[in-house]
Amino acid sequence: MAKRRRSDDEGGPSSSSRRHHHRHQIHLVVDDWTKGYSIYKVDLANLDGADLDSLATPLPGPPVFRLESYHANYSHPWFSSVGGRIAAMHYNEEEEDAPILLYDTTTGGLVVGPRAPAEARFACTFIPNGAQDRLYMMGTSKFHGGEDHFEVLAEEEGGRWAWSSVRKPPFSTWKVACDAACHAAHPDGRTIFFSVYGKGTYSFDTETQEWKRHGDWMLPFRGRACYDARLDAWVGLDSTGAGIVEGVVRSCDVVPTGGDHNNGPPPACNFVKEKMVCEDWNRTKNVALTHMGSGNFCLVEQRFRKGVDANIGDNVYLFYITTFKLRYDKDGEVQATARRTRSYTMPNESTGYNWWVFGM
């Protein structure tokens, strides 16, 4: 039987009782003060379609939550989501393990969750599974040549959270963290697909813990892709132009889970026709995409502010937030519709390197 790691917190409603509707706000996590990180809630109803640097405003404040975590010791913290909560975790070399913190975006409450397994603290990758309100974590016991581990965090009866060990993948978790890789939850609610550079594409059945290989090809995404029922396809950021042309949105057909697909063909893919980021691609620093539910997406672009010297350091960056839906046009191409945009100044104190967006 898998070893269980429980939290001491008993409070809060069961995540399984939460309903997943179209969400009308996003939460931005930004390293905007010397002692840690702030979570800002941005109401998407306030997006007014203005795509001008001169109309940028500060992020709506005050922050809904602040997490103290000194940048000197925690230069690369890990944030992810599980259910309607934002999960935060990090280690330093002096700690053998550390608890995971769970901020409830609905109630504003904070749960100190169970200590994450110390043996998985390096090369750590979070994989949310919204259909089950679970958070999967891949990691290794040390930076190079460590043992692979695959863990899952879930809420049990009584509101307690626990880590469980699950079957290890047939590829190195170090490659998932360090090489080009992506993951996508299947609409069956139980299967997660993984693509790993140089290894191909695999699926993991969360109920039977069975791994299955589907081919040498890779899904065309960077990071996480989400299922859009309107398209009956996965949607995510393109991986082929990562680091060169950021912010290209792609879709691809959902890969079947059944049968023997060890050498199956790759799924058919499409590019979204419209350009979703700045026309001057040199200004785009980073891009994140999140699914809001009911076919609604939100793309957050971090770009250099026009006419501002990148060496100045004050409000050099802007957040450009764009919401949109996708549909097939008469030619069968994927088209972005209902686009709305607004720009926000990045806090002066932010380094511009650490930020995350969650659609909840």
Image: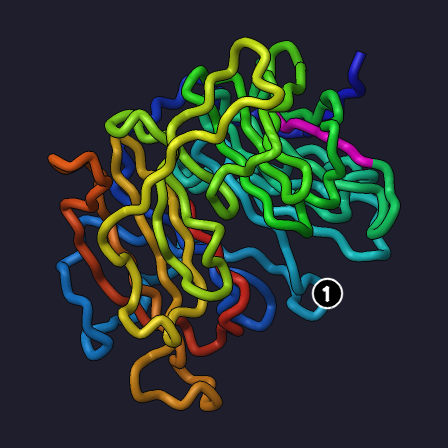
Q: Is residue 229 above or below residue 210?
A: below
The number of numbered discs placed on residues in the rendered structure image is 1
> Where residue 146 sits in the image (x, y, percent)?
87, 43
Please tell me in which quadrant of the rendered image residue 151 appears: top right
Relative to 8, 331 lies left or right: left
Q: Which residues are magenta?
A: 148-154
Q: Position of residue 181 (x, y in %)?
A: 59, 44
Q: Quadrant location of residue 199?
A: top right
Seen at 59% across and 28% down, the residue is 215
Q: Amino acid under label 1?
A: Asn
Render colour scheme? rainbow
Q: Residue at x 52, y 70 (%)?
A: 33
Q: Main secondary structure of the magenta part?
A: strand
> Neighbour class for label 1 at 10 Å: few (<14), some, many (≥20)?
few
Picture quarter with the N terminus: top right
Residue 102 visible in the current orientation: yes
Reading the image, the residue beneath label 1 is: 73
Residue 103, visible in the rendered structure: no
Give how far across and how far down residue 93 sits, in percent. 83, 56
Q: Where's residue 229, x and y in %?
A: 29, 25
User: Is residue 314 left or right of 94 when viewed as pictured?
Assistant: left
In the rendered view of the protein, which quadrant contains the C terminus? top left
Task: Please give the name of the residue rendered at 59% of the width and 23% of the height, measured from the top-left corner.
Answer: 263
Residue drawn at point x = 19 percent, y = 73 percent: 52
* Above or below: residue 297 compared with residue 47: above
Q: Circle 1 sits in a helix, a strand or a loop, which is it?
A: loop
Viewer-nearest residue: 313 or 38: 313
Q: Is residue 70 above or below residue 55?
A: above
Residue situated in front as seen by the camera: 187 or 260? 260
Q: Does 46 sit left or right of 76 as displayed? A: left
Viewer-closest of 244 and 174: 244
Residue 124 colored in magenta in the image: no
